[in-house]
Amino acid sequence: MDSVSCGYIYERKSNSSIVDTLIIQVVAENTGLNYTLSGPPQVSYQDITYNYVTNGLGTGMTVLKNIKYPLTASDTCAGGIYKQIKAYAGLSIAAGKKIGTVFSFKPGYSWTINDTLIGGSSKNVFFMLSSEQNGANTDPTYYGTANDFNSDLDMSYILPQDIRYNQNSNGWNGYFIPTYAYTTPFAYETHDVGYLITVLPTGIKELNEKGFTVSQNQPNPSTGSTVVNYQLAKDAKLATFTVTDITGRLVSTQSIETTKGVHSISLSNYHTGVYFYTVNIDGHTITKKMIVE
């Protein structure tokens, strides 16, 4: 997962010395949090826990990436026009695994439960963009399959004020509420959250047998720069990347990352011709051909 983004409206009303922060937390799946709403229709989902004492994630949550994005005057939205924040994640997510992303606005000013942030307030405010998926006064479309937790469980969650202060009377204290739990109409059911994902070409056999896989360089043929991605199933002791020409002459060699996950190698300034690049991980090699025009 290369990056995560969100659509938002941010209004600055206090002095420029105040620094607000958008906290973005990418969390791993936890099958112990699989639940099914009784419906109808039945909706299966995986929840996210919350700790109102620390005002943070609760028991069972593993944070894969914690991003703190300082909000400045340049992030302000004028005239109700929304913007989008994109944050680098740089995560390797195994096939079939779920992830969740939690967005939290941390104001740089003091506030209380009785503060009014909308309508005449002098404090900064931040809104995540959301909408009704199928139009006004409709329920969202559920793309998963009830009681099948490997199906598409994509959905949005919210943390309302009563759960923030542990005052919910319907059994939701300690949990984010999936918007499917609300009845029609609920106008905030689908949040504007996006992901940029790079998928390595199939290399499952290589990954299982050799412990790593190597992609074809992109673009290929190339006329300028090109990129090779490789994935390590576990940390390696030694990793090298070499390039030879069609005669076998060594053109370049370099040490590369040895940590588990997906890595990229950028190549440029090669003369026109046919080359072969080789990734060597602890004595095991994979070689592919690239063309420069």
Image (spheres, rainbow, N blue to C red):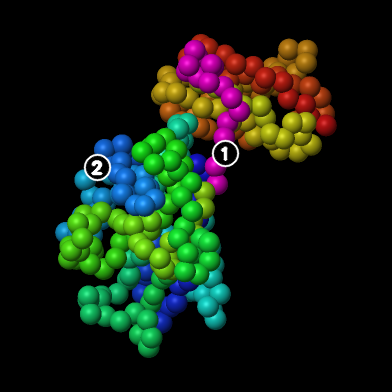
Q: Tell me: 161 left or right of 2.
A: left
Q: Secondary structure at mark 2?
A: loop
Q: Tell me: 101 left or right of 219.
A: left
Above or below, 16 relative to 46: below
Magenta residues span: 196-211
Q: Secondary structure at mark 1?
A: loop
Query: What x and y, as percent, mark residue 93?
Result: 45, 35
Give amino acid for label 1. Answer: Thr
- At label 2, counting other C-alpha atoms closer than 10 Å, the crowd grade (few under 14, some 14-19, many 20 or more) is some
Give the residue pinned by disc 1.
198
Q: Earlier in the sequence, mark 2 or mark 1?
A: 2
Taking the spot 82% from the left edge, 29% from the top edge, the residue there is 272
Most foreground residue, 17 or 254: 17
Query: What x and y, as percent, mark residue 107?
Result: 33, 70
Quadrant, the C terminus: top right
Above or below, 116 relative to 40: below
Is residue 135 visible in the rendered structure shown here? yes
- At label 1, counting other C-alpha atoms closer than 10 Å, the crowd grade (few under 14, some 14-19, many 20 or more) is few
Above or below, 226 relative to 213: below
Most foreground residue, 63 or 253: 63
Taking the spot 49% from the left edge, 29% from the top edge, the residue there is 257
**Numbered tag placed on residue 53 in the rendering:** none
Above or below, 218 relative to 86: above
Give amino acid for label 2. Answer: Gly
Is residue 85 visible in the rendered structure shown here? no
Give the residue pinned by disc 2.
60
Query: What x and y, as percent, mark residue 189?
Result: 43, 61
Taking the spot 35% from the left edge, 85% from the top edge, the residue there is 121
Q: How many discs mark residues in the rendered view?
A: 2
Q: Nearer the viewer, mark 2 or mark 1?
A: 2
